Image: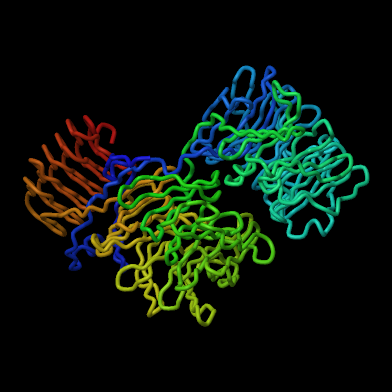
């Protein structure tokens, strides 16, 4: 994938706003600028789009059926947007495909007795419920935010054709009757857990399983009365979730998590006894329908097809593990949908599956014949997640809940190269000559040499899984820093848990030590290292479905030799997280907080010495983990480049000027000095080209200002007189009051932000960027014949007069 050559000014691309807030507590723009600073303001960065960060097929659920004698698979593929497809099982041909607006994550798929398909998708749309008629090809959105919830789980049909499912975050059971269009809310099943994650119909009852506090309930669908089902203690060891419930003949198969990577426990309905043995490591797919011999099948470990005989209770090997198909699936994240079918033209029953990569595979149960082919499912942009730089100087990008996708950004050519990776890469960093990639779930570490051939699982190779559940209860590694011969890892705990950890790992030997609760009840989300000390930032939030107990996030110092915290303290009064730690000028530690502060910390004095508000404190997400917050010091321009709260900001250290450049999630600096950033789906290069001001006006200025060449900057000024810009010259006006007309004719760049002009404003024939943003104009505003459309960068102006031409309505 070649890099795009499109180059656009940041202000033209997305919204920007400039405010002045002195790093030393100065709030008056004139004070900050009159205080002796002669630094030239940074120029408008150029943002170059490189293309989609990651393009992939990511089938998160599949369901199988027949339409007019044709075997078909229904599939939801995650992406931005998510897609719904119907494909022919024997040929892989696309029979129907649609994008699901305002969704990126798919859920379950099931089929009603009349053949109508029902499924769910979400994010940012909450709890969307859809139907698809495979005969007419009609796809309809039934509702979203069903029962006021955000996510729907475990859809199943009762014998009378009612669809029932669980929810998050209020652990409800809800039903939908297609014939009447009515929903029924059975209410929250428990106050202890946020999820009814699994749901099945067992002998006419609704069985619902919760998490991360595990309860198993049987509910009467008519009355709503319920009873709790007790599962033996030996099966509940290290079980926090019931993630699947399916009746097969006289047995109920119940998947447990995180126990053994989703072991399956089996209940005999006739005796009420649970089998002492479990079917191990069945992954994320539900068991198939029964074959002619009364067997159901599960995909253990993603590559071994195991049969369970409901008549004898025997677990039966199938021979699938030795096939080429199993070898191909071993390199993929999973197969989330399998079933038993008799395919057209065949006399035997086969197990069929659709992998996350979009590979349709079949396995003949009597012949042992195995086939695999790519289904015609369109790739879509994945949501970019991890971002970091390897020892080769190249930037690497991970994806959120993907099919195992990453991307390398070449530091010289900016070419994007797709790579195999984990389901979700959380942090990417350098440790000596190793590239380190951490992943969710289970707080996993891979490390490898990017100079060698890339083969995920071998290079980079698995080094450590800290693990959900006992004994450490850790799930996400967001903080990573090299500390000499070891690696320091900061983690967010498991669902429902408080208390992250600082883990020290030797990547060569695999030896590690976990220090949980280095700051009590807080997650460790960002790390920096210098001179034997690890500097850490925390988040008050623990795993999902936990409730914070701490008032504010902390900055702490860990002495590696002593093995203990030697200092901790507040950064701001309202910080829910302290993140994005890195080293700035003069040996200072810098970072960002959830309440919008960029801070400098003096490690010698161990105190916060400067802060600047990059966005209003109330706009931040206090209960986030702050994983996307990054802070980088650019010595050439004297500015910080930081991402926080979904935006990319540039902060002038000398003046305290803050510019919101674009809606971006993360930013890093590669080995060649390129700033590589990602928004939700695309990668960009940020060029901090300094703007050379041939003349800078600050403070009071009486008389006209005329610019005939070069660039003039008016920053924090009060100008009493007309301003005229002509003949290819440029002007940048920031936080300035102008009394008199403002006319630019034939100029290059005309940038006016957060200012007040008392008089008419006219911008005609400019060849570069034209920005009028967050500005009060007492008079008319006219823009004509400019090469680029004037932009308000999403920050409205207040114009007390008519607007005309290209500025009409600004």
Q: Residue furthest bottom?
A: 562
**Relative image position of residue 72 (x, y in whole percent):** 65, 25
Q: Quadrant of residue 151?
A: top right
**Residue 610 as seen in the image, left or right of residue 366:** left
Place of residue 432 in the rendered image (x, y in percent of width and height, measured from the top left): 43, 67
Instruction: Name the image quarter holding the C terminus.
Output: top left
Q: Quadrant of residue 541?
A: bottom right
Q: Residue at x 63, y 29 (%)?
A: 74
158 left or right, relative to 716: right
Task: Please tell me which residue lies in front, 514 or 496.
Answer: 514
Colouring used for the render? rainbow
Front residue of 609/640: it is 640
Give the image location of residue 785, x and y in percent. Answer: 17, 30
Numbered label tally = 0
| Location of residue 348 with respect to 522 vertically, above or below | above
Q: Is residue 45 left or right of residue 642?
A: left
**Residue 184 seen anywhere in this rendered image of the structure:** no
Query: Residue at the location (14% across, 46% down)?
Result: 730
Residue 177 appears in view: yes
Q: Quadrant of the N terminus?
A: top left
Q: Residue at x 32, y 63 (%)?
A: 633
Residue 691 is situated, as x and y percent measured from the top left of the image, at: 19, 53
**Toward the viewer: 356 or 759?**
356
């Amino acid at each position: 994938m070649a890099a795009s050559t499109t180059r656009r000014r940041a202000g033209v691309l997305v919204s920007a706003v400039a405010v002045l807030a002195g790093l030393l507590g100065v709030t008056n723009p004139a004070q900050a600028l009159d205080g002796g600073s002669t630094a030239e303001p940074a120029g408008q960065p150029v943002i170059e789009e490189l293309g989609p960060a990651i393009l992939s097929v990511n089938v998160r659920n599949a369901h199988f059926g027949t339409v007019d004698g044709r075997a078909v698979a229904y599939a939801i593929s995650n992406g931005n947007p998510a897609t719904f497809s119907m494909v022919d099982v024997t040929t892989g041909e696309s029979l129907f495909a649609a994008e699901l607006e305002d969704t990126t994550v798919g859920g379950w798929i099931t089929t009603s007795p009349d053949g109508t398909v029902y499924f769910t998708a979400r994010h940012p749309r909450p709890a969307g419920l859809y139907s698809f008629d495979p005969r007419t090809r009609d796809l309809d959105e039934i509702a979203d935010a069903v029962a006021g919830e955000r996510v729907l789980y475990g859809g199943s049909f009762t014998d009378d054709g009612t669809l029932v499912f669980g929810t998050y975050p209020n652990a409800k059971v809800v039903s939908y009757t297609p014939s009447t269009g009515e929903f029924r809310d059975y209410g929250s099943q428990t106050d202890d857990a946020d999820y009814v994650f699994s749901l099945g119909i067992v002998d006419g009852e609704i069985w619902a399983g919760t998490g991360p506090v595990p309860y198993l309930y049987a509910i009467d669908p008519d009355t709503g009365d319920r009873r709790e089902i007790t599962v033996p203690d030996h099966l509940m060891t290290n079980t926090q979730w019931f993630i699947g419930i399916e009746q097969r003949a006289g047995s109920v198969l119940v998947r447990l998590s995180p126990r053994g990577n989703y072991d399956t426990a089996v209940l005999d309905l006739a005796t009420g006894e649970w089998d002492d043995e479990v079917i191990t490591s069945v992954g994320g797919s539900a068991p198939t329908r029964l074959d002619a011999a009364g067997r159901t099948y599960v995909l253990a470990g993603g590559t071994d097809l195991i049969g369970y005989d409901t008549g004898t209770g025997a677990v039966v090997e199938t021979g699938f593990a030795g096939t080429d198909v199993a070898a191909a699936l071993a390199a993929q994240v999973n197969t989330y949908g399998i079933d038993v079918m008799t395919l057209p033209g065949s006399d035997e029953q086969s197990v069929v599956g659709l992998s996350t990569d979009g590979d349709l595979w079949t396995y003949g149960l009597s012949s042992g014949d195995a086939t695999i082919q790519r289904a015609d499912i369109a790739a879509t942009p994945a949501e970019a997640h991890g971002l970091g730089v390897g020892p080769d100087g190249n930037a690497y990008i991970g994806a959120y809940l993907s099919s195992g996708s990453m991307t390398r950004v070449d530091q010289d050519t900016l070419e994007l190269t797709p790579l195999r990776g984990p389901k979700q890469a959380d942090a990417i960093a350098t440790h000596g000559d190793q590239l380190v990639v951490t992943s969710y779930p289970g707080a996993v570490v891979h490390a490898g040499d990017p100079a060698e051939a890339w083969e995920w699982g071998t290079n980079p190779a698995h080094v450590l899984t800290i693990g959900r559940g006992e004994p450490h209860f850790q799930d996400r590694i967001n903080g990573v820093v090299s500390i000499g011969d070891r690696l320091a890892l900061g983690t967010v705990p498991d669902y429902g848990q408080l208390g992250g950890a600082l883990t020290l790992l030797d990547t060569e030997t695999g030896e590690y030590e976990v220090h949980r609760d280095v700051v009590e009840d807080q997650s460790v989300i960002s790390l920096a290292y210098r001179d034997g000390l690890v500097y850490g930032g925390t988040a008050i939030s623990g795993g999902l479905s936990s409730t914070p107990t701490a008032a504010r996030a902390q900055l702490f110092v860990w002495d590696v030799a002593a093995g203990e915290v030697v200092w901790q303290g507040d950064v701001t009064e309202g910080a829910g997280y302290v993140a994005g730690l890195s080293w700035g000028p003069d040996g200072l530690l810098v970072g960002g907080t959830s309440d919008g502060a960029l801070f400098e910390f003096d490690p010698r004095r161990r105190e916060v010495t400067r802060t600047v508000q990059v966005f209003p404190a109330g706009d931040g997400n206090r209960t986030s983990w702050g994983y996307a917050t990054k802070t980088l010091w650019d010595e050439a321009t004297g500015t910080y480049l930081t991402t926080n709260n979904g935006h990319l900001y540039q902060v002038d250290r000398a003046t305290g000027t803050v510019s919101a450049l674009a809606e971006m999630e993360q930013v890093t600096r590669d080995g060649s000095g390129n700033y590589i950033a990602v928004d939700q789906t695309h990668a960009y290069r940020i060029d901090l080209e300094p703007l050379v001001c041939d003349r800078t006006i600050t403070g009071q200025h009486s008389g006209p200002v005329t610019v005939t060449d070069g660039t003039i900057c008016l920053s924090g000024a009060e100008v009493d007189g007309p301003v005229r810009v002509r003949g290819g010259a440029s002007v940048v006006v920031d936080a300035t009051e102008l009394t008199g007309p403002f006319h630019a004719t034939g100029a290059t760049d005309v940038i006016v932000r957060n200012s007040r002009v008392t008089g008419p404003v006219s911008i005609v024939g400019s060849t570069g960027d034209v920005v009028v943003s967050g500005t009060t104009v007492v008079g008319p505003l006219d823009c004509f014949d400019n090469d680029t459309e004037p932009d308000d960068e999403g920050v409205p102006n207040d114009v007390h007069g008519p607007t005309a031409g290209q500025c009409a309505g600004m």
